[in-house]
Amino acid sequence: MPLARGLNRKISHHKRILSSQIVSKNSLIPGMILFFTYNVAGVYDRRPMLFLMQKEGEKIHGVNLNYLQETLVQKFFSACHKLTPIVKESIMKTESPYSRLTLKTQRATSAVSSQILYKKIFPRDRHYKEVYRTYFLNKATSIKLVNYKFDILEKEKK
């Protein structure tokens, strides 16, 4: 799929990564931010940073943050945080805590599902729909859970 106008280059958000840790495909939970290798012919971004919205079978769906300017990433998560909180957690016995938007999952209850998030947040800016992607888990390797620096959480600390 060709990239939408204005989204023709990848943006590095590595300065915003506080930490990362390898996780298994079975432990992925909606609301996480993931970084992985995706070596598939014809794919432009082989190292996507994905805000995971949904996992269904061998597919994962979400927002590829590499195609959004940092201001849009922060705007997106600020709007999401108004619907459901971004929390620091370590429920998967990870080395260090990570930030996750609390979306409804089989393991955890929340009033906000990925479908509600899509309906409420995506119409606010056309870029969000343009960077929504689906990936096949069997093609993804070196999956890392990312602890991302969110401005909205930094403001709440102060």
Image (spheres, rainbow, N blue to C red):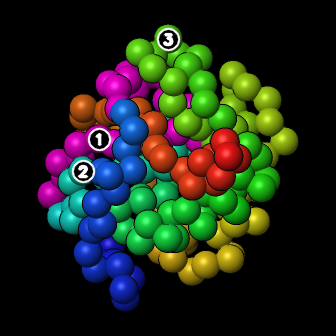
- Does residue 62 lie above or below 66 as drawn? above
Marks 3/1: CA distance?
20 Å
Which mark's residue is nearer the viewer, 3 or 1?
3
Say which residue label 2 marks: 47
Which badge, 2 or 3, comes first in the chain's sequence?
2
User: What amino acid does circle 3 point to?
Assistant: Lys
User: What amino acid does circle 1 point to?
Assistant: Phe
Q: Residue at x 68, y 77 (%)?
A: 124
What residue range appears in magenta? 20-41
Instruction: Quadrant for the N terminus, please.
Output: bottom left
- Does residue 90 lie above or below 146 as drawn? above
Marks 2/1: CA distance?
6 Å
Q: Residue at x 71, y 52 (%)?
A: 81
In this view, which residue lies farthest toward the right? 111
Q: Secondary structure at mark 3?
A: loop
In this view, which residue lies farthest toward the top? 93
Say which residue label 3 marks: 93
Q: Secondary structure at mark 1?
A: strand
Q: Secondary structure at mark 2?
A: loop
Q: Position of residue 68 (x, y in %)?
A: 42, 69
